[in-house]
Amino acid sequence: MEDITKQKHLKFKDIIAYSLGLFGFQAIVGLLFTYQAEFAGSILKSSVIVVAILILVAKIVSAAADPIVGNLIDRSKSKLGKFKSMIVYSILPLLITTVLIFVKVPFTGVGLYIWIFIISLIWSIAMTMADVPSQGIAAALTPNPTERTNVVSISNTAKQIGFSACAVIVPIVCLIVKGGSKVIVPKGEQDDAMISNEYLFAAVLTAVFGCVLLSLIPLINKERVTNTSSGTIGFKDMFAALKANKPFMLVIISYFLGFGRQMAMGIQVQTSTIIFGSQNLVVVLGIVTAVGSMISMAICPFLIKKLNEKKTYIILSVWGFAASIFSFIIGHFFFANPDVLVLKILFFASLFLIGLQFGAVTLMPMIMTADCVDAYEFETGKRMEGACYAILTLTIKVCLALGMAVGLVFVGASGYYDSLGSSEFSSKSKDIIFFAYTALPGILALLSIIPILKYDIVGEKKAKISTALAERRKED
């Protein structure tokens, strides 16, 4: 019997197209996650805490779209491919709604909050139409689990960079747009806040750029693993299958417990302001953490090969806890003594060390979900990538929104907005925001290990499943 892990299915262009597609899509997601609340507060003059709550509610309400999209994918008979066809349908609504969110509308009061909620809800549904199939197609690109792990690792490194791309795009736009300004900084001679045209231009640029790259997935990639189940799968079957897929549920519970990792990205602009006195220097904060994150995802395949998925997740999460607590402690002393060179070096080094954990939250759930899809097909004969990735992307969306909401509550409690325009932030404000940026995500990362302790799709069991499915597909 030929070893399935030795078979090659993916070409270089497949990997590049898929990686660029995720990069473009995540550039859009990262823009909204980082700047939507700031735009609503500074340009639309709304309460950022209320906006954060509205976005969270919109994510929860739009949750109904996730199982619908997943079910439509699993039922699809499109000649283009069940994943690729849904991605094609998502591109135009995603582009339009991304731009509309950053339009300076003439509404005030209740009308303004209704607009923010409705456009956030529509965007969330459009995002789901792109997110579920773009993540789910990873399980269908190749039947080789080792090859799949490698492509997920490479593409999710691109995905992580894409999510942080706004930290580069927005400052560049601020320099280009005529009549614009740079940032709010709490100093005496600071520049003014970003103007509405800067936000809008950044949104148009990111939306067009992101959607063009996203279209590369349906244009170039192939779905090589077809659905081997018989008949159609209804909603009742789908939820019953998810309930029965215990390893997958452990992955989902773990992701929820670790939602604090999303919190850091949600308040990165505010954290940049308290550290550097500038919103646009978020690019420095983003790059320092992103380098560590990229290294983390690059080494994940090697760790998985030497250990397994379960042990790799646990090691990265424990590391994340230790690095986050270390960074918070160093940050406390650095804020009080910013001119001490040793503290400055340790501070930036600690931010880099935090990034080394992010393979656990960005990469491992994708790999584990694909393995859970295989395991369920092995046991039942039904392959349900659409259902599983719909639940995973729903989890990611809710955790992103929850992280933003909780993070902004900490920002509000710190007195951050009251201090803007004054000479300096207080030590208390800095400590509260930096606790939400570092220590709390680290604590929750440690908690996320608990469900993974029972995860068992690893080693010989995983190899047995992959080999059996390969033989079954040859017979079909």
Image (cartoon, rainbow, N blue to C red):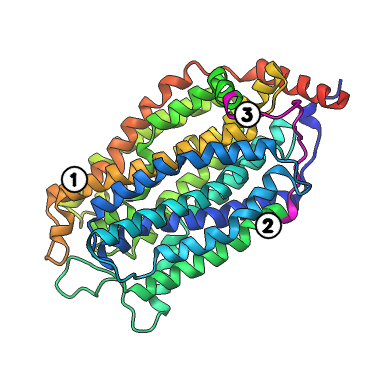
Residues at marks 3 and 2, CA–CA distance in whole angstroms: 30 Å
Q: Which residue is mark 3?
A: 234
Q: Earlier in the sequence, mark 3 or mark 2?
A: 2
In the image, taking residue 406 as reference, residue 289 lies left or right, namely: right
Q: Residue 458, position in %: x, y?
A: 61, 20
Check residue 361 for magenta coloring.
Answer: no
Q: Which mark is residue 129?
A: none
**Residue at image coords 64%, 48%:** 86
In the image, taking residue 31 as reference, residue 473 lies left or right, namely: right
Q: Earlier in the sequence, mark 3 or mark 1?
A: 3
- SS at circle 1: helix
For mark 2, does the 10 Å Cα neighbourhood hold few (<14), some (14 to 19), or many (20 or more) residues?
many
Q: Residue 215, position in %: x, y?
A: 65, 58
Q: Please identify, in this view, whether the residue under mark 3 or under mark 2 is nearer the observer.
A: 3
Q: Which residue is mark 1?
A: 431
- Mark 2 belongs to which amino acid? Leu
The residue lying toward the viewer, choosing from 18 and 53, is 53
- SS at circle 3: loop
Say if mark 3 contacts mark 1, CB within 8 Å: no
The residue lying toward the viewer, choosing from 85 and 109, is 109
For mark 3, does the 10 Å Cα neighbourhood hold few (<14), some (14 to 19), or many (20 or more) residues?
few
**Prevailing secondary structure class for the magenta stretch in the rendered image:** loop
For mark 1, does the 10 Å Cα neighbourhood hold few (<14), some (14 to 19), or many (20 or more) residues?
some
Q: Which mark is residue 216?
A: 2
**Residue at image coords 13%, 50%:** 427
- Mark 3 belongs to which amino acid? Gly
